[in-house]
Amino acid sequence: MNKLYDTPKPEGFRTANTYLFVNDAPSYIDFIKSVFLGEELSRTVRPDNGDIANCILSIGDTNIMIAQARGDFENMATAIYLYTSEVDKLYEAAIDAGCESVFKGQDMDYGDYQAGVKDIQGNYWWISKRGSADSY
């Protein structure tokens, strides 16, 4: 690792981290908790209007941050690559929560078993497990 990045970070954070601005932060936080079993670590609310300024959620061994989109910080779709031991289970939970299917679980030529969904804010989630479907 380049020494430039050898610096202390809060627990659960990596060198580069996901920070999402979404149109309805409260419902998106609930979505993350429900579908991906995210654990809310902290929440900061703007005193002037009650909007979520920052919410930190833990998914597995990684933290993500979510804030209410506003002004120059517009809702901006992205893609998130998520590793799990339960690809099909999380895929079905996402579909049940209103996500759009991109593709059902399948073996990929790069060595992952993967499914894809587009979530309620337009983000893509590649739900993956290293290995083939037969390796479950």
Image (cartoon, grey):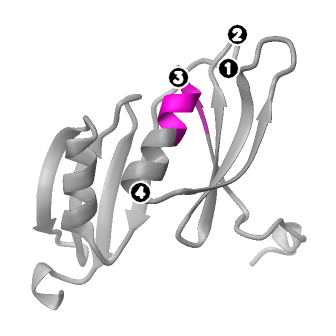
Q: Relative to 22, is 125 above or below? A: below
In front: label 1 or label 4: 4
**Distance (Cα) linking label 4 and label 3:** 18 Å
- Circle nearer the N terminus (1, 4): 4
At x 56%, y 30%, the residue is 26
Secondary element at image label 3: loop
**Distance (Cα) linking label 1 and label 2:** 5 Å
Residue 59 position in % (x across, y down): 53, 62
C-beta proximity under 8 Å, tags 1 and 2: yes
**Distance (Cα) linking label 3 and label 2:** 14 Å
Which numbered dot is residue 71?
2
From the viewer's perspective, tell me whether residue 125 is left or right of residue 103: right
17 and 91: which is toward the camera: 91
Q: Relative to 121, is 36 above or below? A: below
Span of residues in magenta = 20-29
Q: Amino acid at mark 1?
A: Phe
Q: Relative to 5, is 72 above or below? A: above
Q: Amino acid at mark 4?
A: Phe
Residue at numbered disc 1: 73
Is residue 129 covered in magenta?
Answer: no
From the viewer's perspective, tell me whether residue 85 is left or right of residue 56: left
Q: Relative to 107, is 81 above or below? A: above
6 and 82: which is toward the camera: 82
Label 4 neighbour load within 10 Å: few <14, some 14-19, many 20+: some
| Image quarter of residue 70 | top right
Which numbered dot is residue 24?
3
Label 3 neighbour load within 10 Å: few <14, some 14-19, many 20+: some
